[in-house]
Amino acid sequence: MSNTNDTEKANRLYRRKYLFTGYLNKMVPILSVIGSFIDLRRYKCGNIAMQQFEIIILVLKEIKSNYDH
């Protein structure tokens, strides 16, 4: 009885992890493209919001690399 419960729990966790990494795999390239556009604009205006955006990209990439293992 508990064995099937554990299996279901493991499957649910695996599915959640898979969905999350799939989401990150789609998001990171999009964010990188946006980030490169921001790099082009930074020469015109050094904005704090752009730096925060870069930090978000770095954090997402870090999370993604942790999930890929």
Image: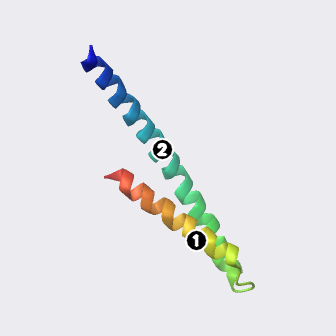
Snapshot quadrant of residue 35: bottom right
Residue topped by disc 1: 54
Instruction: Examine the rendered structure and indicate whether residue 68 appears above or below residue 38.
Output: above
Residue at 48% from the left image edge and 51% from the top image edge? 25
The three-letter code of the residue at mark 1 reads Glu
Q: Residues within 10 Å of mark 1 (few under 14, many from 20)?
A: some
Gap between marks 2 and 1, in whole Å? 21 Å
In terms of secondary structure, where does tag 1 sit? helix
Q: Tell me where residue 49 appears, x and y as whole percent.
A: 69, 73
Q: Which mark is residue 36?
A: none
Residue topped by disc 2: 20
**Quadrant where the N terminus is found in the figure:** top left
> Most extreme residue toward the top, as rendered?
1
Snapshot quadrant of residue 8: top left
Horizontal relation, residue 21 to residue 1: left or right: right
Horizontal relation, residue 31 to residue 60: left or right: right
Residue at 42% from the left image edge and 41% from the top image edge? 17
In terms of secondary structure, where does tag 2 sit? helix
Q: Tell me where residue 22 appears, x and y as whole percent.
A: 48, 44
The three-letter code of the residue at mark 2 reads Phe
Instruction: Examine the rendered structure and indicate whether residue 38 appears above or below residue 60.
Output: below
Q: Nearer the viewer, residue 5 or 21?
A: 5
Q: Residues within 10 Å of mark 2 (few under 14, many from 20)?
A: some
Residue at 54% from the left image edge and 65% from the top image edge? 57
Horizontal relation, residue 5 to residue 56: left or right: left
Give the total number of marks visible in the rendering.
Answer: 2
Residue at 62% from the left image edge and 76% from the top image edge? 51
Q: Tell me where residue 34 appears, x and y as whole percent.
A: 64, 65
Instruction: Examine the rendered structure and indicate whether residue 9 appears above or below residue 55.
Output: above
Instruction: Examine the rendered structure and indicate whether residue 52 appears above or below residue 62.
Output: below
Q: Nearer the viewer, residue 42 or 63?
A: 63
